[in-house]
Image (spheres, rainbow, N blue to C red):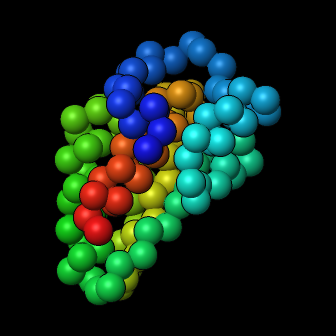
Amino acid sequence: MSGLAARNCVPCKGGVPPLKGKEIQPLIGQLEGWAVMDEHHLTKTYKFPNFAEALKFVDQVGEIAEREWHHPDIYLAWGKVRVDIWTHKIDGLTESDFILAAKLDQAYSARS
């Protein structure tokens, strides 16, 4: 797992520009399966064998988000969970978004 998962999210107070272009590349390169959408947010869909397992993961994502004070958008469907992450305060990406993504991947991998 990437070194990002070992770090903690830093609350954004605003006033900083969102990451763009070349600033994003080294961070997304440390993640697997995540897509950067319009240099605005990260997205990934996790797969599960049924609704119950997907719901358990949603609860786990919520616990991680609360612990990190960084809250993604979560979409639950039968057998899948899509997570979209960005820093709402600046309406774009910060390093904390990539840290949270790595933590979610680590939690997902630990379920196997």
Task: Give the quarter of the image for residue 23.
Answer: top right
Give the vertical position of 59 relative to 6 (above or below).
Answer: below
Q: Residue 78 or 103: which is nearer the viewer?
A: 103
Query: Quick check: 79 left or right of 57?
Result: right
Q: Position of residue 43 (x, y in %)?
A: 56, 56
**Is there any visible trace of residue 80 in the rendered image?**
yes
Q: Residue at x 25, y 51 (%)?
A: 62
Task: Give the quarter of the image for residue 1.
Answer: top left
| Quadrant (top left, top right, bottom left, bottom right) of the C terminus | bottom left
**Is there any visible trace of residue 40 in the rendered image?**
no
Q: Residue at x 49, y 67 (%)?
A: 45
Q: Residue 32 or 101: which is nearer the viewer?
A: 32
Query: Quick check: 47 left or right of 56?
Result: right
Q: Residue at x 20, y 47 (%)?
A: 63
Task: Give the quarter of the image for residue 15.
Answer: top right
Q: Position of residue 20 (x, y in %)?
A: 74, 30
